[in-house]
Amino acid sequence: MPTYQVRVLDRGGRRRSLREVAPDEASLREALRARGFWIEAVARPRGGRHLARIRIATGDFVPLLHQLEMQLRAGVTADVALRQLADDLPPGPAQQMLERIHGEVAGGKPIHEACRFFERQFPPHVAAVIAAGEASAQLPAALRSLADHLESAEEIRKTAKRALIYPACVLVAVAALVVFLLGGVVPKFAEIFSSMAMKLPWITVVLIEASRVVRTQWPWLVGGGMLLGVGTILALRWPRVGYARDAALLRIPVLGETIRCLATARFASHCRLLHEAGVALLDALETGAELMNHRVLSAQLRQARQGVAVGQPLYASLPKDHAFPGFILPALKSGETTGQLSQALQHIEVYAARRAKERLATALALMEPMLLAGLTAVVGVIALSFFLPLFALIGGINRH
């Protein structure tokens, strides 16, 4: 029999959300009226897998965390707070998510277990923070820390995306210009030069041949480019290839330092969040290594975790030739020796994020003239290949 999501008012006038099984909607309504409920809405819930993949934008999710935190601090119970939040939201994914979580919590399930159903919105490290907050009776503080963490991570992502917009637009414009010139302009000049039966410079011959290849072999070029892209993506999934790629990126001036600082900020942010929530340091380090999204630094952090597991401090467990920024060791040493590791991780997170933004601005400032120079060079080479035969022709006319 189908399952229905029902919103009702009970005899005391309290709004409740129920999940009921019935042969059809008419039978369900009759059964609920017999139990003394006033029916507000009846809906068939979506498929479980589709519902579990709900994802809410960070800008909409963080305010929900803040509102839930304020209600919990005011003494409102979790199920009532979740119910009120769901009622205040317009119909949509956020309301569906909160209604399901409320139903699970009202049935006696812990909040973190109800949240784990939404695997994309509550990945393991986020659910772990909520679980630690519930276990330590400090759920409002855990929610505040989680909201701050999500806002910081979203700001870093937006900064990186903004930095990539300009070079991406320039590269697309250059590619479109080259295709236009090779496909439309060069053939016209090639016809003129061919009718004159004159000897062409090598650069013009190369350009004409490139134009011919683009016009006649473009399906193979497009297919080859797609295969190359797919092959590159698949190759990067291999651990060794991905590791070599990440190691090579770290050696690029400016860009390597930017990647290093971004990965360090992610590690410090996630590790601090879990450590403050009461998660064991070894587990926090493992989660931080998984979420760094950089194979070289993740491998070095896991190596340091092995040293922590046998009683060594974290700052002394990092490899001597580690690829982390230089400021991480003094900060970790200071935090561990004074018993303020969370504050040290927060300092690393803030400083690494600020340096990453500065490096992104520097990289963008350097990339702008480099891209313009590249565009000028491409257009200049094509123009030179046009003008050299014309100069030779004009010179021959003047000699005669």
Image (spheres, helix red, strand yellow):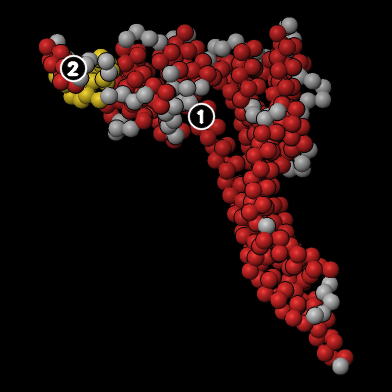
- SS at badge 1: helix
Whole-percent x, y for residue 100 in the image? 34, 20
Q: Alpha-carbon distance for marks 2 and 1?
A: 41 Å
- Left or right, 225 with respect to 105, comes to right
**Could you tell me the amino acid type at mark 1?**
Leu
Q: Point out which mark residue 150 bears.
A: 1
In the image, farthest residue toward the top: 310
- Does 161 appear above or below 113? below
- Left or right, 244 with respect to 67, comes to right
Mark sitting earlier along the chain (2/1) = 2
Q: Residue at x 51, y 15 (%)?
A: 128
Q: Point out which mark residue 28 bears.
A: 2
Q: Point out which mark residue 295 bears.
A: none
> Would residue 54 be visible to someone looking at this image?
yes
Foreground of the two, 339 or 277: 277
Q: How many labels does the image show?
A: 2
Whole-percent x, y for residue 4 in the image? 26, 20
Figure quadrant of the C terminus = bottom right
The residue carrying pointer 2 sits among few (fewer than 14), some (14 to 19) or many (20 or more) residues within 10 Å by Cα, namely some
Q: Which residue is drawn at 82% across and 90% down?
A: 397
Q: Residue at x 76, y 64 (%)?
A: 209
Whole-percent x, y for residue 338 in the image? 67, 14
